[in-house]
Image (cartoon, rainbow, N blue to C red):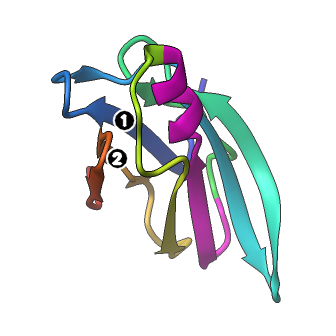
Amino acid sequence: MSTSHVTTHVLDTGTGKPAAGVAVTFHRLDGERWVKIAAGATDDDGRIKSLGPDKLPSGTYRLAFDTGRYYEAAGTETFFPEVTLTFAVSESQDHYHVPLLLSPFAYSTYRGS
């Protein structure tokens, strides 16, 4: 299995553990509308290793994380029912890893490796 051009993982910083079962959708901006490329859910290690094709054209993309359902299942209130990360992809780059550090009332991200 080849690795996707874009991968992600979610760490629940409130518990210090990977966030398993977070639904994620992956979109590409086409003109003025978002086109769904793929969808998945984080595994027991909080990762999605295969999300979309192994090569993408340059452009603007976004990952949408269903954090509301994740926290609802945990019985925890959250301020962010969805986290959407929008970023630029260059087809000249081999891989993008876009992690999400998540707590019920805050989140952060960075370009990983």
Q: Name which residue type carries label 1.
A: Val
- Closest to the observer, 78 or 33: 78
Distance between mark 1 and mark 2 Cα atoms: 5 Å
Residue 66: image quadrant is top right
- According to the picture, the residue beneath numbered tag 2 turns out to be 100
Q: Position of residue 113 (x, y in %)?
A: 26, 50
Name the disc covering residue 10, or none: 1
Q: Residue at x 61, y 77 (%)?
A: 58
Instruction: Tell me, yes or no, if residue 71 can be seen here.
Output: yes
State yes or no: discs 1 and 2 in contact (Cβ < 8 Å).
yes
The stretch drawn in magenta includes residue 69: yes
The stretch drawn in magenta includes residue 83: no
Answer few, some or many: residues within 10 Å of disc 2's Cα (few below 14, many 20 plus, some between 14 and 19).
many
Q: Position of residue 99 (x, y in %)?
A: 34, 47
Number of numbered tags placed on the structure image: 2
Instruction: Tell me, yes or no, if residue 2 can be seen here.
Output: no
Residue 47: image quadrant is top left
Answer few, some or many: residues within 10 Å of disc 1's Cα (few below 14, many 20 plus, some between 14 and 19).
many
Q: Which residues are magenta?
A: 56-73
Q: Position of residue 31 (x, y in %)?
A: 82, 88
Q: Quadrant of the N terminus?
A: top right
- Closest to the observer, 33 or 67: 67
Q: Is residue 111 above or below residue 26?
A: below
Q: Residue at x 42, y 11 (%)?
A: 44
Q: Residue at x 57, y 42 (%)?
A: 4
Q: Name which residue type carries label 2.
A: Leu
Q: Is residue 47 above or below residue 17?
A: below
Position of residue 20 in the picture relative to residue 3 (left or right)? left
Q: Dot 2 lies on which element?
A: strand
Q: Is residue 45 above or below residue 67?
A: above
